[in-house]
Image (spheres, helix red, strand yellow):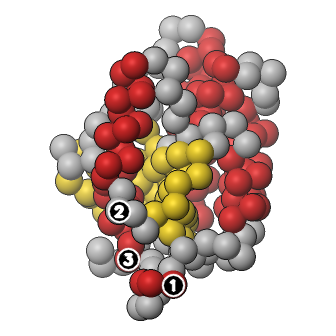
Amino acid sequence: MKHLTLILGGASSGKGKYALARGNRYCSSDKQNTKKYYLATAQALDDNMLSRIEARKKERASDWITLEESIKVPDAFSFLNKRADVVVIDCVSLWLSHLLMIRGDYDIQAESETLIAAIQKVDFSVVVVSSEVGCSIVPADPVSRLFTETLGRMHQSLALLADEVYFMTAGIPIQVKGGKS
C-alpha cells in the first residue's frame, strides 16, 4: 500500500467528509487521470439509513467512483488492485456489524484479520473510516462485547500500520499519529 490513513470518531463526527478530503490529497498531480474509489459498506435497511446514504452520495464529487460492498470487503480490495489510486472505505465498523448481525456465521476476528491483510497487499493509498465505540462502558451482552472487542483490536492493528491516524470530534480532526497534516 502506498499510504494508509485511519480516521476514527463517533457517529456524525465528520469522519466521512474528512476522509474524502484526505483521499483527495493522495491523488496524482494529474487529477484527470486519478482513479478515486469510495468503498461504501452501508446497506439501506431502513428509511433513516437510506437518507444517510443519499446524503453521503451528495457529499462526494463526481470524480469518485462508488463501489458498494457490505460483506466481501477484502475481495473488493483485491478487485481494486491495478485499478485505483486511492480508496476510501466508509466504514469498517459498519462492515463488521454486518458480518456479526446479518451473517452471524462469520468469524469476525478472522474476517478483520483478512481485511487488514488485504489492505497491506494493495498498490494504492487507503483511507479507512471507522466508528470508535470503545470510549463507553463495557456492553452487558456477549454479542455487543464481541463486536466492541473485535473492532478495538482491528483499530489497534490498523493504527499500527497507518501512516496517519486522526480522531474526529465535532467535525475537527485531531491527529493522533503521523507527520504534519
Horizontally, residue 18 falls left or right of residue 94, namely left
- Secondary element at image label 2: loop
Estimate the x, y position of residue 40 in percent, counting from the top left. Answer: 53, 46
Estimate the x, y position of residue 115 in percent, counting from the top left. Answer: 70, 50
Residue identifier under label 2? 61
Q: Count neighbours of disc 1 (C-alpha within 10 A) and say few if under 14, some if 14 to 19, many if 20 or more.
A: few
- Secondary element at image label 1: helix
* Residue at position x 42%, y 28% in the image: 50
Q: Is residue 51 above or below residue 139?
A: below
The reply to whether callout 3 and callout 1 are in contact (CB within 8 Å) is no
Q: Quadrant of residue 82?
A: bottom right
Query: Residue flagged by tag 2: what amino acid is it?
Result: Ala
Q: Is residue 61 above or below residue 73?
A: below
* Residue at position x 41%, y 91% in the image: 29
Whether residue 105 is visible: yes
Q: Residue furthest top?
A: 141
Q: Nearer the viewer, residue 49 or 123?
A: 49
Residue identifier under label 3? 25
Horizontally, residue 171 falls left or right of residue 143, namely left
Query: Residue flagged by tag 3: what amino acid is it?
Result: Arg
Q: Count neighbours of disc 3 (C-alpha within 10 A) and say few if under 14, some if 14 to 19, many if 20 or more.
A: few
The reply to whether callout 1 and callout 2 are in contact (CB within 8 Å) is no
Specify the label residue 33 is tagged with. Answer: 1
Specify the label residue 133 is tagged with. Answer: none
- Calculate the distance from the C-alpha at mark 3 to the C-alpha at mark 1: 14 Å
Give the mark nearer the N terminus: 3 vs 1.
3
